[in-house]
Image: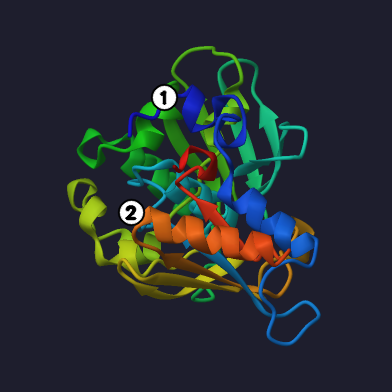
């Protein structure tokens, strides 16, 4: 997939031309949709998919839907977008633009990796360095931080980025999530794309990966330790089912529609294009 600065997020989440997977899921949760086995806030949202996702790594992802899953569910990007597509604090609780030469981010102290360790400025700098290295062939490196010259840790929860040159929409450069340095610092940039971590990621977001059977299904469960101030997304499990062929997916979608129940979201193949 050829992701440019614009399609990767420069014009807002999912570039407005894509149907955001996680936006749909979160809408279902907010509205009480989804397949529930016990009523209330619990239960499972089932998502139909035409193909499996790529490796779950914020530096080496190669497709739009993996990117959305990383940024909205499994990891915590430095900045996020609000419902008006304006940049808002997320992992960074605040920032200060230093004229047109750089930006300083103050990170939240209550975001933790799913193994319990805190997310720190060292993780952010590590991820920047890996993405910036040409050997990683990272879309973050080419689509987001091409105008950023270097990163500097000033304390455990403060990181400064120096710009290579003045440029517009500088905060949008940071709609990417850090990796855990303590788990990946011994993996070189060229090996990062094929690291075992990518199939069993330790993230920091509102959901955890608990199961991934290749070309069959992927299961996420809520992360109870995720800060409530960052809009923790309810208590529903999310299950992605890989459905072949696409005609079967369409039949399932019609079946749910005819029952008046929309508890399956078909993405990655627009239903209106099926014949």
Question: In the picture provided, is 48 more to the left or to the right than 142?
Answer: right
* Rendered residue at 40%/55% (across/down): 247
Q: Nearer the viewer, residue 215 or 8?
A: 215
Residue position marked by numbered label 1 in the rendering: 4
Q: Is residue 50 visible?
A: no
**Percent x, y of residue 155:** 56, 50
Q: Residue 253's spot in the image, x, y percent?
A: 56, 59
Give the quarter of the figure containing the C terminus. Answer: top left
Tell me which corner region of the image, top left, top right, bottom left or bottom right, holds residue 89. Answer: top right
- Which quadrant would residue 55 be assigned to in this image? bottom left
Q: Is residue 265 left or right of residue 212?
A: right
Q: Quadrant of the N terminus?
A: top left
Mark 1: secondary structure: loop
* Spot occupied by residue 71 in the image (x, y as percentages of width and height): 54, 50
Are the residues tagged 1 and 2 within 8 Å (C-beta)? no
Q: Is residue 36 visible?
A: yes
Q: Which residue is mark 2?
A: 54
Q: Please state which of residues 219 and 194 is positioned toward the viewer in this rendering.
A: 219
Pick the front one: 227 or 217: 217
Q: Judge the density around disc 2: few (<14), some (14-19), many (≥20) Cα neighbours within 10 Å.
A: some
What kind of colouring is applied to the model shown?
A: rainbow
The residue depicted at 66 percent of the width and 25 percent of the height is: 97
Residue 123 relative to residue 205: left or right: left
- In the rendered view, does 193 fall on the left or right side of 202? left
Res. 10 image quadrant: top right
Q: Residue at x 65, y 42 (%)?
A: 80
- SS of the residue under disc 2: loop
């Amino acid at each position: 997939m050829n992701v440019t600065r614009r399609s990767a997020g420069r014009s807002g989440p999912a570039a407005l031309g894509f149907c955001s997977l996680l936006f749909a899921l979160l809408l279902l949760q907010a509205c009480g949709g989804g397949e529930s086995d016990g009523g209330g806030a619990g239960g499972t949202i089932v998502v139909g998919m035409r193909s499996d996702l790529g490796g779950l790594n914020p530096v080496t992802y190669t497709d739009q839907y993996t990117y959305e899953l990383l940024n909205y569910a499994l990891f915590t990007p430095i900045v996020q977008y609000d419902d008006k597509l304006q940049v808002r604090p997320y992992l960074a609780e605040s920032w200060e633009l230093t004229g047109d030469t750089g930006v300083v981010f103050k990170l939240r102290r209550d975001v933790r990796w799913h193994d319990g360790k805190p997310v720190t400025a060292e993780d952010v700098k590590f991820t920047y360095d890996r993405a910036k290295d040409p050997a990683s062939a990272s879309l973050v490196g080419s689509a987001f931080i091409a105008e950023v010259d270097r990163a500097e840790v000033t304390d455990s929860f403060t990181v400064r980025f120096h710009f290579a040159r003045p440029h517009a929409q500088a905060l949008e450069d940071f709609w990417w999530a850090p990796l855990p340095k303590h788990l990946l610092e011994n993996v070189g940039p060229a090996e990062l794309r094929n690291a075992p971590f990518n199939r069993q990621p330790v993230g920091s977001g509102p959901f955890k990966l608990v199961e991934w059977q290749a070309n069959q299904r992927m299961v996420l469960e809520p992360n109870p330790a995720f800060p409530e101030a960052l809009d923790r997304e309810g208590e529903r499990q999310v299950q992605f089912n890989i459905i072949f062929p696409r005609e079967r997916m369409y039949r399932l979608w019609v079946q749910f529609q005819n029952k008046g129940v929309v508890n399956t979201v078909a993405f990655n193949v627009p239903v209106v294009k099926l014949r």
